[in-house]
Image (cartoon, grey):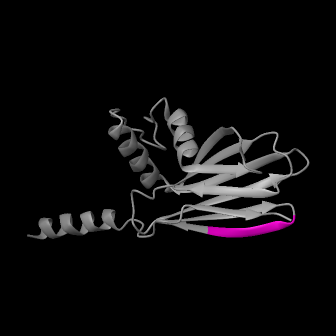
Amino acid sequence: MQSLLTILILGMWSFFAHPIHLTLSEVVYEEKSKTIQVTHKIFMDDLERHIEESLKVKGKEVNLKLGTSNEHPDTDRYLAEYLAAHFKLLINGKAYKANFLGKEYEDVACWLYVEILNVPKPKSVDLTDSFLMDLYDDQSNLVNFTFPQKKGSMRFIQGKVRESFSIQ
């Protein structure tokens, strides 16, 4: 009986490991170099699960094992593809190629780094952030941004994954 109780408690602990479903992104325009630097922080287990489930739907069985010594050799490619599919930026109505720079692991989180080159001074920004949206109903994605003459934050939730704004 006591072992059953222990199993139930351990199972509940893993289920409630992080009861908040949140990602954080930072978008910064560097006027001097005409680049946009993007940093994402995502819970590693959620990211891994979402990528693996997305690949499984496409007929690919992949076990990423993020942050372990047995990490899948194509992890960077899968991460770059995931970012391109779920985080889109249009500057002045134009899409630019995002270059995946790399990743870092910090406890239960994964930091992902992206750079967009040769971006003229932004006058309008259209942003789509659908990270993990079809995984959790309560998913919330926060994006902080810094552009010339405009700083702010946006929150993306189910049914609201795209937002536009002008920079004057």
Residue 60 position within the rendered picture, expressed as x and y whole percent measured from the top left: 35, 32
Residue most extreme to the top: 73
Residue 39 position within the rendered picture, expressed as x and y whole percent measured from the top left: 66, 52
At horizontal 39% and vertical 62% (from top left) the residue drawn is 136
For the C terminus, the quadrant is: bottom right
Q: Quadrant of residue 9?
A: bottom left
Residue most extreme to the front: 93
On the picture, is 4 further left or further right than 131?
A: left
On the picture, is 153 further left or further right than 166?
A: left
At horizontal 64% and vertical 68% (from top left) the residue drawn is 154
Nearer to us in this view, 12 or 31: 31
Is residue 152 located in the magenta-colored stretch of the structure? yes
Nearer to us in this view, 6 or 74: 74
At horizontal 82% and vertical 57% (from top left) the residue drawn is 123
Is residue 62 located in the magenta-colored stretch of the structure? no
Prevailing secondary structure of the magenta residues: strand
Q: Quadrant of residue 101?
A: top right
Q: Which residues are magenta?
A: 149-154
Q: Classify 143 as above or below 76.
A: below
On the picture, is 10 further left or further right than 64?
A: left
Residue 97 position within the rendered picture, expressed as x and y whole percent measured from the top left: 69, 38
Nearer to us in this view, 139 or 47: 139
